[in-house]
Image: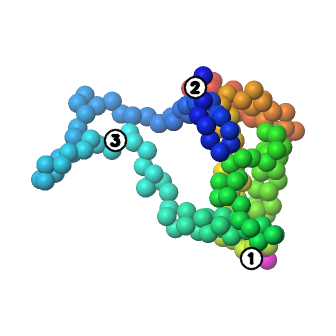
Amino acid sequence: MKKKASVYGERPLGKIDVEYTIPKLSKPKMREWESGGKRDTEVGKLDFEGFLSPLVLMRYAKYMHKHRKMKDGSYRDSDNWQKGFGSLSEHFKVCMKSLFHHFMDMWMAHRGHESRDGMEDAICGLLFNAMGYLHRILECKLENCGDIDDLKKIPGSRIGELENNAKNTM
């Protein structure tokens, strides 16, 4: 298997399947402008500009930057979170527990009660932990981690059952 060097060491190159349907066209249509410019259609392509909100991403980036500062006054790298938090099962537990703390803050703010950091930071904390959790799942799929089964060992986890159900419905 080919490997790619990164700041995290050598990593095997893999592929994440992006599942989305592409309508079958008898003839791929081209868009053509009076200037002579031509482009293929956008049919079947992921629409990041439509799926994401620049307002949300800007607010999230500000949240992440605020939390880069460490107690000694130095700043951790912006992608430090991608290194994970311990073993795979420990990483998932850390993300899940923190996600619930932020969820409780969001819920408290939603109900009009005082929360630790307010609604926006609570939502950003939820996003951070959800992305950290998903990042490790996808990274493990890319690297064919032998310890992806650790997910199934987490008390109360239904990951294996959910994966089997998903495979059976395809």
Q: Is residue 88 above or below residue 60?
A: above
Relative to the observer, which residue lies in front, 20 or 111?
20
Q: Mark 3 = which residue?
A: 43
**Circle nearer the viewer, 2 or 1:** 2
**Residue drawn where x is 59% and y is 34% of the image:** 4
- Based on the picture, tell me whether residue 133 belongs to the magenta stretch: no
Residue 112, labelled with which disc?
Answer: 1
Magenta highlight range: 110-115
Give coordinates of residue 78: x percent, y percent. Answer: 65, 58
> Viewed as shown, does residue 38 lie left or right of 79?
left
Secondary-structure class at tag 2: loop
Q: Name the residue under label 2.
A: 2
Q: Which mark is residue 26?
A: none
- Judge whether residue 113 is colored magenta: yes
Say which quadrant the N terminus sits in: top right
Helix, strand or loop at mark 1 = loop
The amino acid pointed to by label 2 is Lys
Mark 3 or mark 2, which is nearer the start of the sequence?
2
Pointers 2 and 1 in contact (C-beta within 8 Å): no
Q: Which amino acid does label 1 sit on?
A: Gly
Type of secondary structure dominating the magenta stretch = loop
Q: How crowded is mark 1: few (under 14 residues within 10 Å), some or many (20 or more)?
A: few
Residue visible at 82% across and 44% down? 86
Query: In the image as oriented, which residue stretches furthest toward the right?
Result: 155
Please state the horizontal and vertical placement of residue 73, each as a whole percent of the image: 76, 71
- Which of the two discs, 3 and 1, labels the residue nearer the N terminus? 3
Of the two numbered discs 3 and 1 in the rendering, the one whose residue sits closer to the viewer: 3
- Its colouring scheme is rainbow
Query: In the rendered image, is residue 166 in sight?
Result: no
Write the residue at 36% across / 33% down: 23
- Labelled pair 3, 1 in contact (Cβ < 8 Å): no
